[in-house]
Image (cartoon, rainbow, N blue to C red):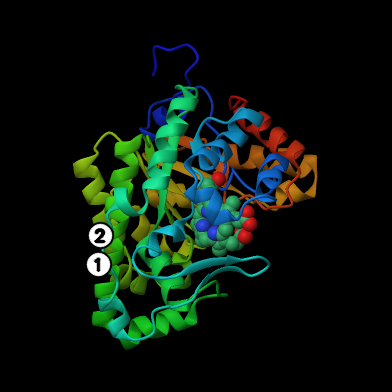
């Protein structure tokens, strides 16, 4: 990639901790409803129809790349599609979000979960990755992703969204053996899925642990971290050159446990103080984050101020990948996205 003048590998170089002239920029959920081009397609197709059609998924992945000078693409998919071939019936209900019609209730429901074959069961996303790589033609790298086992377990047990997934932790404490078995099965599925994505052309992978923050650090270490670690260890062994990114939302109290993972990049949510995190975890790491996505709804000045603060705060780290502290909000004006990227791309004084 480096020899092609049209190619941009600043994101991959930052992931590996190489020194770069400016922070690379991408945004979690960058393909989505804040874009008019996305909404136009979405008026014709359901979200799952779009994800399961490789042509459409590739097109949506490329929409933000065509619209903005981003340094990476992320494949258009969803963390929840992995649970369908395991036997959980998924539906996205408008105004309500994702719903599983047969969530895990009894320990026997865990026994009934099927193992997956990524090529057979999630081939639509693997094909979308191949198509997207072809169409990107080296312009920017493509990121693959999955949910972390704990966050997937949250949806599988709760059957949908929840404020803090109390029922999930209750189930975990009540059925420790079935919990371990559920986490084993999710870990195997996530591992084959991510290896399939890498084989199909994903050049870096991110695990989204969106609900990790609902646990104490002690419980996170006992009931979630060992499985997430196993995934990263397998990837490190089987796909050593592919950068591994860990994202946890609301995870300020989990930083030490998360930092023990064999990953290249730690992605922090906006509640975490970047300077304090670097003091605690060390400047020898690569960090990603962590602008509060709400700033994009406020004003141009709020965006510029926030971007400068974030860049300044991470300036002491080995490398910094500029991102939001969580997914972009659907009412975000596209002009503010443009402003964010322009400001983030300026070299740090
Ligand atoms: O980042 C990207 O551009 C890639 C696409 C992507 C989607 N989902 C598409 C999507 C990614 C990375 C995800 C991850 C995801 N999905 C997470 C982890 C990240 C996070 O935000 O914490 C989670 C928890 C989910 C589960 C999920 N998917 C929920 C709770 C919802 C409904 C809530 C909502 O925002 O509507 C979705 C739907 C979804 N996934 C949409 C998109 C673009 C919106 C669906 C639509 O078009 O109506």
The answer to whether 8 is drawn above or below residue 329 in the figure is above
| Residue 271 in view | no
The quarter in which the N terminus is drawn is top left
Residue wearing tag 2:
188
The answer to whether residue 143 shows anywhere in this view is yes
User: Residue at (69%, 42%) from the top-left corner?
Assistant: 35
Rendering quadrant holding ligand 1: bottom right
**How many labels sit on residues?**
2
Q: How crowded is the residue under tag 2: few (<14 C-alpha within 10 Å), some, or many (20+)?
A: some
- Given residues 18 and 231, the one toward you in this image is 231
x and y, in percent, of residue 317 in the image = 45, 38
Q: Is residue 165 left or right of residue 240?
A: right
Q: Of helix, strand and loop, which one carries label 1?
A: helix
Return the residue at label 1. 184
Asked if 30 appears above or below 346 in the picture, the reply is below
Image quadrant assignment for residue 218: bottom left
Discs 1, 2 touching: Cβ within 8 Å: yes
How busy is the neighbourhood of tag 1: few (under 14 within 10 Å), some, or many (20 plus)?
Answer: some
Label 2 within 8 A of ligand 1 by Cβ: no
Q: Position of residue 138 (x, y in %)?
A: 45, 22
Q: Quadrant of residue 64?
A: top right
Residue occupying the point 79% across, 40% down: 300
Residue 28, numbered circle? none
Question: Where does the image place residue 108, in percent across and percent down from the top left?
Answer: 28, 84
Image quarter hosting the C terminus: top right
Percent across and percent down for residue 12 are: 41, 30
Q: Residue at x 76, y 50 (%)?
A: 297
Image position of 343 (left or right of 57): right
Measure the alpha-carbon separation of dots 1 and 2.
6 Å
Viewer-closest of 242 and 277: 242
Q: Is residue 194 left or right of residue 90?
A: left
């Amino acid at each position: 990639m480096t020899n092609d003048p049209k190619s941009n590998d600043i994101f991959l170089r930052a992931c590996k901790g190489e020194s770069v002239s400016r922070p690379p920029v991408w945004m979690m959920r960058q393909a989505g409803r804040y874009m008019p081009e996305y909404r136009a397609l979405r008026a014709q197709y359901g979200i799952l129809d779009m994800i399961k059609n490789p042509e459409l998924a590739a097109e949506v992945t490329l929409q933000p790349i065509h619209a903005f000078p981003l340094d990476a693409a992320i494949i258009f998919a969803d963390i929840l599609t992995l649970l369908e071939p395991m036997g959980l019936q998924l539906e996205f209900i408008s105004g309500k979000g994702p719903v599983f019609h047969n969530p895990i209730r009894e320990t026997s429901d865990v026994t009934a979960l099927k193992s997956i074959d990524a090529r057979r069961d999630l081939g639509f996303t693997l094909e979308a990755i191949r198509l997207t790589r072809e169409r990107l033609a080296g312009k920017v790298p493509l990121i693959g992703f999955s949910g972390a086992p704990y966050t997937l377990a949250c949806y599988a047990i709760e059957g949908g969204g929840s404020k803090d997934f109390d029922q999930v932790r209750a189930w975990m404490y009540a059925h420790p053996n079935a919990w371990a078995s559920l986490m084993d099965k999710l870990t195997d599925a996530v591992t084959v899925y991510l290896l399939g994505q890498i084989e199909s052309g994903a050049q870096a992978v991110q695990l989204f642990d969106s609900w990790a923050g609902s646990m104490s650090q002690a419980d996170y270490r006992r009931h979630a971290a060992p499985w997430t670690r196993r995934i990263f260890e397998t990837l490190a062994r089987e796909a050593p050159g592919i950068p591994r990114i860990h994202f946890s939302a609301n995870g300020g109290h989990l930083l030490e446990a998360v930092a023990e993972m064999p990953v290249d990049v730690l992605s922090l949510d906006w509640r975490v103080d970047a300077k304090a995190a670097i003091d605690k975890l060390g400047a020898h790491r690569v960090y990603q984050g962590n602008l509060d996505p709400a700033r994009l709804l406020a004003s141009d000045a709020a965006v510029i101020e926030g971007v400068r603060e974030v860049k300044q705060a991470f300036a002491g780290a080995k490398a910094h990948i500029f991102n939001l502290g969580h997914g972009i909000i659907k009412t975000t004006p596209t002009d503010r996205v443009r402003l964010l990227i322009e400001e983030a791309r300026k070299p740090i004084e």
